[in-house]
Amino acid sequence: MNVSGSAGSVSGSGVTFEVSKNESINIFGVVNNDVFGCYDILSGVVSDNVINIFGRVAGNIYCAFSNPSPGSSAINNTVIIYEGASLSINSVLLGGRKANDKDDVFSGNALEIYAKNIQIYGINNFEIYNFHLPRSIKKDDAIIDVKAGTGCTKLDRSPETDDPINLSSTTVKAQFQSEEDIPILNVGDKIYLIVSSGIGAGINNAPVNSNIDMNGLFGATLLYDYSFLISTTNTSLYLEVKDSKFDLNPKANNCLEEGTAQILFVNRSLGLLAGKGIREAVDSVSSNNDGSLNSYGKAGAFGVVSVGNLKYGGNTLEINGISFIAGIAKEYMPIVDKKLVLGAFLEHGEGEYTVKTSYDQDTILGHLSGKTEAKGNPQYMGYRHFGKIWIVECQRYFWKDNR
């Protein structure tokens, strides 16, 4: 079921007597009242409801809402809050609404969060809390701010029925949403997962697990390995960095070699200009010089083409390509033993390269080994102007690169 406009209450199904496996409820628009995975269970088990919140919900969110009759349960259901979703400060999130002490509205129910700075009234009956830390997460950020603990389980909103959030049988999971844009955290830094400090609020006990490790690739060049301690106080559940390690990614050699390939390819143009290019320019004007005064100042056209193959680092890097220069030069009247040649030209080059690397080393993530291969097609185009002065046996070249 998709809700993209505006609605009052939303329910996946009505009265249920048997096992119910409802389709997902996706809230893209605005719901002005409550959202139910299943409403008014008379008997049986409601499971596998998934409620996805992308938009705004002003009321409560229940995986299932049980009737006071015995023998109805809501288990293995999921509520997912995505980044950009908006909840009311009066909203209560429940894995299931418990109307009878014999009902199971806790087992397997999961709350997954892809956002931060979520403010709600209460939260209860989730066995699994799964936090997908967003890219913008940083030290001392809070994911969920809960005003009233369980938010009045009986839903009468009277302070005397508010209870602290009991985490004694829960499991906490956490991971970064993106392994390429993780925060840089130091030992001792904290990320607050649940904060509950209002009337009748607080945190009771600690979850089942006490540690979480997160590791992977940061960008293209670094490996990361964070170890977090899961801790609680009377008012909060938080992650504290116990250890943080970074290491070079052995696969990054491939990226470095690709950069080398591009630099070497462009450098071929510099060598072509400083060597054969300058000589051809000078020869083009010298051929127009017959020794008379009228022959000085005449322009000459020149061109140079270079086709070749280059191997670097054994068979690690191979470059094939073509480069050419075409331009005009002009020689001015010599003064004593000096001669001045000026010119301008266009240049262009294109080719292909292949990079093959291998790695076999110990890292913070264990021993990594393998092979990589990359291919590319570099090209360049530009223009330059140059001058050349001959003074006795000394030569000097200068040019401006306008690429």
Image: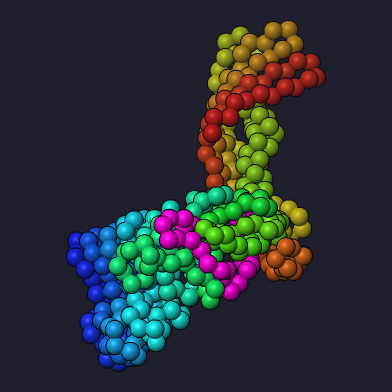
Q: Is residue 14 left or right of residue 115?
A: left
Q: Residue at x 32, y 59 (%)?
A: 90
Give the residues drawn in magenta, as a range.
195-222
Residue 384: % across, % down? 56, 28
**To which quarter of the image does residue 161 belong?**
bottom left
User: Is residue 226 one of those drawn in magenta?
Assistant: no
Residue 282: % across, % down? 65, 25
Q: Is residue 304 left or right of residue 106?
A: right
Q: Is residue 342 left or right of residue 143?
A: right
Give above or below for 41 relative to 115. Answer: below
**To which quarter of the image does residue 33 belong?**
bottom left
Q: Residue at x 26, y 67 (%)?
A: 34
Residue 377: % across, % down? 55, 53
Foreground residue among 401 and 307: 401
User: Is residue 220 one of those drawn in magenta?
Assistant: yes
Give above or below for 257 relative to 281. Answer: below
Quadrant where the image shows the N terminus: bottom left
Q: Residue at x 30, y 90 (%)?
A: 43
Foreground residue among 233 and 401: 233
Residue 390: % across, % down? 73, 18
